[in-house]
């Protein structure tokens, strides 16, 4: 069995301004770097064998900061861990996205959750096979983590009020060729609060 502790990267300016990032390569801001360091400190009481990351700079920098806190080698880039591609809505706020592409309207270039799962699960399977019995830190993105949680809970989580916070850590095991969720590090806030939608 391989244990995966899957971390969402720290905050970026687009996170701060509620813009959809997708595969757009946005760096951490100062808050995000502090969140990464805080996450590293929280993880010091456990043994880690290695750390891997999405190649996007917000994840890579988060992973490097955490690795520094934990005394781990330079993180390995795993390309399939990159964020879900959001096509024409990248850079838009939630409100702008709804105005241009209301619910039910196809967004050009938007990667499906199944497509995300089809590239991320095999990558985790390869890591589990190569590092059987180890504890791995995996730094990736909210869309990837949400997709994995939905898969592991048959869609029960995350609910609309369960947001995957920057710097959060979600615990999974790879057991009998399956990804099993052990702990969901939920931040429960209303979508209306997050996106400043009038109630």
Image (cartoon, rainbow, N blue to C red):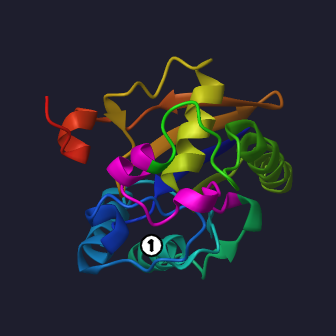
In which image quadrant can residue 38 be found? bottom left
- The percent position of residue 80, horizontal first and vertical second, equals 75, 60
Q: Is residue 160 left or right of residue 142?
A: left
- In the picture as drawn, the residue positioned furthest to the front comes out as 100
SS of the residue at dot 1?
helix
18 and 165: which is toward the camera: 18
Q: Is residue 172 visible?
A: no
Q: What's the residue at 20%, 39% (across, down)?
A: 197
Q: Is residue 169 visible?
A: yes
Q: Residues within 10 Å of mark 1 (few under 14, many from 20)?
A: many
93 within the magenta span: yes
- In the picture as drawn, the residue positioned furthest to the left comes out as 199
Q: Quadrant of the C terminus?
A: top left
Q: Is residue 50 left or right of residue 192?
A: right
- State whether residue 77 is above or below residue 144: below
- The percent position of residue 86, horizontal first and vertical second, equals 60, 56
Q: Quadrant of the N terminus?
A: top right
- State whether residue 179 is above or below residue 115: above
- The percent position of residue 47, horizontal first and vertical second, equals 51, 57
18 within the magenta span: no
Q: What's the residue at 26%, 64% (across, down)?
A: 16
Q: Which residues are magenta?
A: 81-99
Q: Is residue 71 left or right of residue 86?
A: left
Q: What's the residue at 77%, 44% (across, down)?
A: 115
Q: How many marks?
A: 1
- State whether residue 160 is above or below residue 64: above
- State whether residue 186 is above or below residue 18: above
The residue beneath circle 1 is 62
Q: What's the residue at 56%, 72% (across, down)?
A: 24
- The percent position of residue 146, horizontal first and vertical second, equals 53, 39
């Amino acid at each position: 069995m391989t244990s995966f502790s899957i971390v969402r990267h720290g905050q970026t300016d687009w996170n701060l301004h509620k813009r959809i990032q997708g595969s757009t390569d946005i760096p951490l801001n100062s808050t995000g770097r502090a969140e990464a360091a805080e996450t590293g400190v929280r993880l010091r009481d456990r043994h880690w064998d290695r750390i891997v990351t999405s190649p996007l700079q917000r994840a890579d920098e988060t992973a490097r900061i955490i690795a520094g806190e934990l005394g781990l080698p330079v993180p390995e880039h795993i390309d399939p861990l990159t964020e879900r591609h959001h096509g024409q809505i990248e850079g838009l706020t939630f409100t702008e996205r709804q105005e241009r592409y209301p619910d039910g309207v196809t967004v050009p270039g938007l990667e499906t959750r199944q497509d995300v799962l089809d590239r991320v699960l095999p990558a985790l399977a390869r890591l589990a096979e190569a590092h059987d019995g180890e504890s791995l830190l995996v730094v990736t993105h909210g869309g990837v983590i949400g997709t994995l949680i939905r898969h592991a809970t048959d869609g029960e989580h995350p609910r609309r009020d369960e947001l995957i916070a920057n710097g959060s850590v979600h615990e999974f095991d790879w057991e009998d060729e399956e990804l099993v969720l052990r702990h969901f590090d939920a931040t429960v806030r209303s979508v209306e609060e997050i996106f400043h939608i009038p109630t």
